[in-house]
Image (cartoon, rainbow, N blue to C red):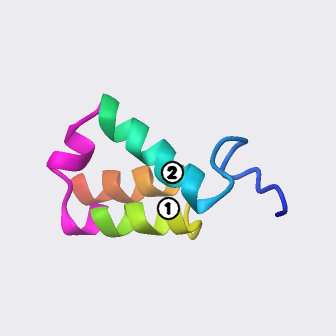
């Protein structure tokens, strides 16, 4: 596996990204309980490695404005 700096050292694999997302949702429950269908899709794309967490936040922030 080649290192991808976009995801940082602890989120290189889909399993690691899923764990990071789970930890974020544990500390900020609104990321899970009030997540729109679009947000859930972006989370899935993050876990798959298609987009970074910064991309997720940017896309969600534009949705809310």
Which label number is shown at residue 46?
Answer: 1
* x, y percent for residue 1: 82, 63
Q: Decide if residue 52 is in sight here.
A: no
Precedes in sequence: disc 1 or disc 2? 1
Query: What residue would you read off at disc 2?
Result: 53
* x, y percent for residue 39: 29, 61
Q: Residue furthest top?
A: 27
* x, y percent for residue 31: 26, 45
User: Contact, CB < 8 Å: mark 1 with mark 2?
Assistant: yes
**58 displayed left or right of 38:** right
Residue 30 lies within the magenta run: yes
Q: Decide if residue 30 is in sight here.
A: yes
- Determine crowd level at label 1: few under 14, some 14-19, many 20+ residues with C-alpha closer than 10 A: many
**26 displayed left or right of 23:** left
* x, y percent for residue 50: 57, 70
The image quarter containing residue 51 is: bottom right
**29 displayed left or right of 20:** left
**35 displayed left or right of 54:** left
The image quarter containing residue 26 is: top left
Q: Which residues are magenta?
A: 28-39
Instruction: State the CA–CA distance, disc 1 to disc 2.
Output: 6 Å
């Amino acid at each position: 596996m080649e290192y991808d700096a976009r995801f940082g050292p602890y989120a290189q694999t889909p399993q690691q990204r899923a764990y990071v997302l789970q930890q974020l949702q544990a500390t900020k429950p609104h990321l899970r309980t009030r997540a729109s269908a679009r947000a859930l899709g972006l989370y899935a794309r993050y876990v798959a490695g298609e987009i970074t967490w910064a991309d997720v936040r940017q896309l969600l922030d534009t949705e809310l404005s």
